[in-house]
Amino acid sequence: MNSFTSAMKTERHTQSDCKRLPGMVKQNAFDYYGASSKEGCIPRTPRDKPCSYNKNDTDQTWERLCRKGRKLKLQTMDFSDLWDEEDLGFFDEDENSKTLCSPMGSGTNPPILPPPPPPPVFCFPFSPISESTLMSSSQLPQKDNCLMHSPLGPLSFSSGLSPKKKTRKLHWTEINTLPSLHRFNRFGEKTIWATLEPLTLDTNRLEDLFELKCQMSPLFQRDRKKQALTVLDFKRSNIVNIALTSLPPLHIIQSAVLNFDECVLGKEEIEKLLSLMPTEEELQKIKEAQKKNPGMPLASAEQFLQTMSSIDELSARLHLWAFKLDYDSMEKEIAEVLYNLKQGMEQVANNKTFKYILATLLAIGNFLNGCKVKGFDLEYLEMVPQVKDTVYKKPLLYHICNILLEIFPESTDFYSEIPSITKIAKVDFAQLHTNLVEIETRYNASKEHHKVVFKHDSNQKQKGQLSRFLKECAKKISVLKAIYRRVLKRFHTFLMYFAYPSSAVHTVSVSNFCKLISDFALEYHTTRAQILQTMQGKRLRRGAVRNAKSHGSYNTYAGDNRHHERMKEILSTPERTRRYDTSLPRTRSKQKKQDTAGRVPKSLEWLI
C-alpha cells in the first residue's frame, strides 16, 4: 500500500496540470503525454517537456484555488481521504487516455498498446475449465492448508468436474471476463475475484447435501400455495402484511426479541411490533381454525401473530425494550429546554441594549405622562410598536431606535443576542412537566417488566445489562427532576428581577413571557435595520452631491440645472448675435419707430 501511495503522489505531480485545470485543449495534453512514445501512452516527466500553454485569468484563478486545496469536511464528517483524481472518474479517464493515445492528429505511427491482462484465476472447481487445470490437494502450497478446513467436515478432493447426481443449481449471473481497473484505485489494481485464493472442496459431500429428490408436480405445488388458512378480517390482515414488508423475516424477529438485539430491531420496528400485538380473541380463532384444518398452513398474517404469541412475556419485553431505546431522546428533549431557559435568562439579564431600551422608554413615558415612576410592567412592550406620534405617524419604537442610535451608538439589534429565548418561545413549557412525569412513569413500569421478563429467563448477561441500565435511569431521572425545580425557581427570581410581585410569579407562563421578549426584540431588530438603511442611503446621496460639486457638474437635479444654464446663456449673449428662439416672447421694435420719426420722407427730399 505504501508503494501504491507513492506512485499515486508521483502521478499527481505529472498529470495535475493536464487533467484538472480547465481551459486546456487536447493538443496540450497530447503534447504532454507524447503520442510518439515507443512504449505507448506513457506520460512524460516535467523535466523532459513541461506542459506550457497560455494561461488566461480563469486558468490562473483555478490553478491558485487548486494549489490552496480544499478541506473536504462537512460538519463532523471527514471526506479528506477522497483523491483529486477521483473527480475525473475511471470511465472518463479511460476515454481521455484513448483520445490522447490515438494516432489521429499526429503524423507518427500509432503507439504499441500494452499486452492484455492475464486470464483470471477461477476460485471454484465448479467453473467450466479443463480438468488438467484442477490442482490436487497434494500440489497446493503449504500456506493454503488453512483453507482446507470447512464447516462441511474434512475435505477430500474429488477430480469430478460435474456432479454425477442431479443437484440444485445456483441461478446467478456469470462473470467470465474480469475488467481491468485504473491503477489509481482506492481498492487496488485488481477486482475482488482476482484476489481470491483457489479452494478444494469435498464435492462428494456437496453432491449428497444438494441432491435434488423427487419433487411434486408444479400443478400440485401451485394448488398447495393457494391453500392457506385465513382467519383475520381483510383490514387487519392487510395492516399486518403491509407492516411485514418493512420488517425482517419472521424467524429473525423472534430471535432478536428474545435477545434484545438492537442491531436487528430499532425504535421504529419496536413501535410497529407493539402496534401489531396479537389479541386473545385472534389467537383463539387461529387455534380453532387449526383444529378444523390440521394440514393446512397459516397465511402470512396469521403465522406472524402465532409466532409472536409464542414468545414469553412479549408485551413486557417490547415495552422494556422501547423504554430503553426512547430514554435518551426523552431525556435530551427535556434537558435542552431547561438549558435554553437557563441560558436565555442570562442573555436577557446581561444585555446592555435591552437596558438602554427600557431606560429610554421609561424616560419617554415619564415625560409624556407628566410623572416620575420607577418602572413599568414588561407586558407593555407588546404595545410599543402600536403607539404612533401625531405628526409623522411613526411608531414609538421608531423614535426609541433613533434615540438609541444617537445616544448609544454601541447598541446592537438585541434579537441576535437572545437565541435561547427565541427557542423557548417556540416550545410549550407546560408540556415539559408532563414529559417529566411520563418518563418517571415509564421507568417504574420498566422495573416491573424487568422482573417479569427475567423471572423465568436464565440469560444472566442480558439481565445484568438491563439492571445496570435501569439503575442509571434512576440516577438520571432524579438529577433531571432537581434541575427542573431549580431552573423553575430561577425563572421566578428572574421575574422578580423585573419587579414582578412575588405573588404573581407563579402564574406567569414561561412560554408566554419568552414569546413577549422575543417578539419585541424582533420588532426592534426590524425597525432598527430600516433606520440604518435609510441613514446609509442619505449618506450615499450626500457623498454623490459632494463628488459632483468637486468635478464641476452639479447633476443632482438634472432638469433644473439645464434650465439654469440655458437662462444664463440667454442673458449673457448680446441682442444682435442672439439666435431667434420661438419659445421666448417677441421684443417690440422701438428702434424702428425712432428711426422713421427722425428721418425725412423721400417725397420731400427736394425741399431740402
Image: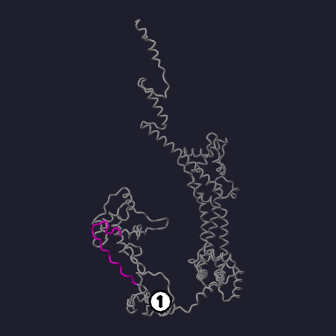
Residue 139, position in %: x, y?
A: 37, 91
Residue 255, position in %: x, y?
A: 59, 82
Which quarter of the figure is the C terminus placed in? top left
* Left or right of residue 163: residue 287: right
Image position of 294 with respect to 44: above or below: below
Query: Which residue shows up at 61% across the image and 63% down it?
Result: 337
* Left or right of residue 500: residue 92: left
Residue 269, position in %: x, y?
A: 61, 75
Image quadrant where residue 569 sits: top left
Image quadrant where residue 185 sits: bottom left
Image quadrant where residue 267 sits: bottom right
Depth check, front residue: 349 or 63: 63
* Observer able to see residue 462: no
What's the magenta bit mostly, secondary-structure-wise? loop
Depth check, front residue: 421 or 345: 421
**Residue placed under numbered mark 1 in the picture:** 150
Depth check, front residue: 11 or 478: 11
Depth check, front residue: 241 or 73: 241
Q: Amino acid at mark 1?
A: Ser
**Residue range highlighted in magenta:** 98-121
